[in-house]
Image (cartoon, rainbow, N blue to C red):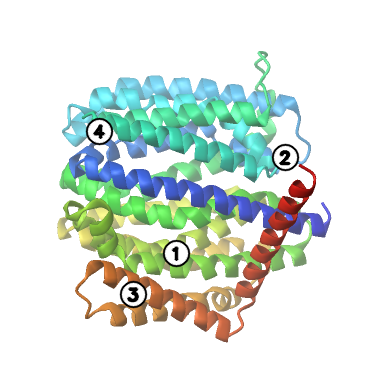
Amino acid sequence: MAGHDLKEKTAKGLFWGGINNGGQQLLNLIFGIFLARLLSPADYGIVGMLTIFSLIAGALQESGFISGLNRKKNITQADYNAVFWFNVLCSLTVYIILYAAAPLIADWFKQPVLKPLARLSFLSFVISSFGTTPRAYLFRNLQVKETATLSIAALFISGITGIALAWNGFAYWGIAIQTLVFCFCTTVLSWYISGWRPSPHIDLRPLRGMVGFSSRLLITNIFTHINNNLFSIFFGRFYGERMVGYYNQANKWTGIGYSTLTGMVWNVTQPVFARLEDDAERRCRAFRKMLRFTAFISCPAMFGLALTAPEFIIITITEKWLPSAGLMQILCVGGAFIPITSLYSNFVISQGRSNVFMYSTVALCLLQTGSLFLLHPYGVRIMVVTYVFINLLWLPVWHFTARRLILLSFRQALLDMLPFALMAGAAMGGAWIAAWPLESIWLRITVKIAVAAFLYLGAMRLLEAAVLTESIEFLRGKLRGKKTELNKRRKNP
């Protein structure tokens, strides 16, 4: 792919990735507010106890083959077909195992209702398995706009369903059914938009060339899900379903913040870096530009969410969820760096080094699990602070896994991202001081946002940050393009 074409595809991918994730997170925000007002912390906690099982099952049915298909230089219908049938057969097998294990899950958490709820909820990854290959087709071909359309449509339909069920008293059953509707809509729309269809002939031999890479990615994904959902296990066992609900609500709003950027970058980085595999200089330039852009957005966004967490919780989902605010603030600090670690992981995967990524993820997960097991008698806040602290300390390890591939020192990487983190932190400190004397919650959150944005963007402008200039120029170009297109339509209706 020519340099100009790749740059254009990257810019468009980032733009539509932003539309996709921004739209999804906006809908998650709106529907989440309605549902949190209608449901109790215990309702969320009951469903949250099953999250880790559903995620691990989903990872097993996908088995890393989306990235495996993306890595393959010459791909055929047989490759797609083999992945499709493997996903379907694997998901059915895993569902049967989890269906039988549902009583054991209910006994572990001491919640008998989890037995029937688990058997219903786990159908989600079976439904999703039918759409994995069409989504892989869209992903490989950088059809981010099409992916954005289907994701937002599926989220809208499922969100309306969830609110209707909660309004009519279905409680945690409504959340489970909402997830099933989302998976069903995503699968159907993926088939329709991608145009890809499987053949009835089942031949898994084409998987041989992808198994080594994909199996390591599978192990990595499983440990990542365990690491990200450890608290549901510990809190559910030792502190009860209400604490799981409080934590899940804090983690949900934090996730909406960093997932917007992480998803936007994920849709672009793997395909782009895979195409730059043989050009070390361009690869390094592309990585550094993405690193600066990620830090430029993620640090002020997540620090700002931490700054406004108490007001945000009270205004949107009422004071019954206020215990979530303190946890949310801690998670947001760590969440600012999650898109950066995601950038590193996507780069390593795109270069075929899934084994390196796997070892790092497994080690981090084991360290986190051990620390939480030792610290759970000391309370929830100590556990969450330790979890975030370990994730931050692991950033040099992520860099070390990719250093030889990027040809970039850790000092250079820090110089690329730390200025944005420091300026964002200073801006949030100034905003907190400005809003501290104010009693009105609406005035306080308004002042915090306005002052933080003014200080951060003012500092960027004063220092003539290249990433700010490039972002503004790109958006202006998109607006000019849209205006030109509208003018053409008016002249030629």
Residues at marks 2 and 4 touching, judged by CB atoms closer than 8 Å: no
Residue depicted at 39% across the width and 78% down the height = 451
Which residue is tagged 4?
167
Residue depicted at 28% across the width and 54% down the height = 316
10 Å neighbourhood of mark 2: few (<14), some, or many (≥20)?
some
Q: Is residue 18 visible?
A: yes
Which residue is tagged 2?
72
Q: Is residue 81 left or right of residue 450?
A: right
The residues tagged by marks 1 and 2 sit, at their Cα atoms, a distance apart of 30 Å
Viewer-nearest residue: 5 or 51:
5
Mark 2 or 3, closer to the camera: 3
Viewer-nearest residue: 431 or 71:
431
10 Å neighbourhood of mark 4: few (<14), some, or many (≥20)?
some
Residue type at mark 2? Lys
Q: Is residue 298 left or right of residue 332?
A: right
Q: Residue furthest top?
A: 200
Q: Residue furthest bottom?
A: 462
Residue type at mark 3? Val
Viewer-nearest residue: 366 or 30:
30
Of the numbered discs 2 and 4, the one sitting upstream in the chain is 2
Which residue is tagged 1?
394
Q: Is residue 183 left or right of residue 285?
A: left
Residue 216 coordinates in the image, percent (x, y): 55, 42
Secondary structure at numbered mark 3: helix
The residues tagged by marks 4 and 1 sit, at their Cα atoms, a distance apart of 43 Å
Which residue is tagged 3?
447
10 Å neighbourhood of mark 1: few (<14), some, or many (≥20)?
some
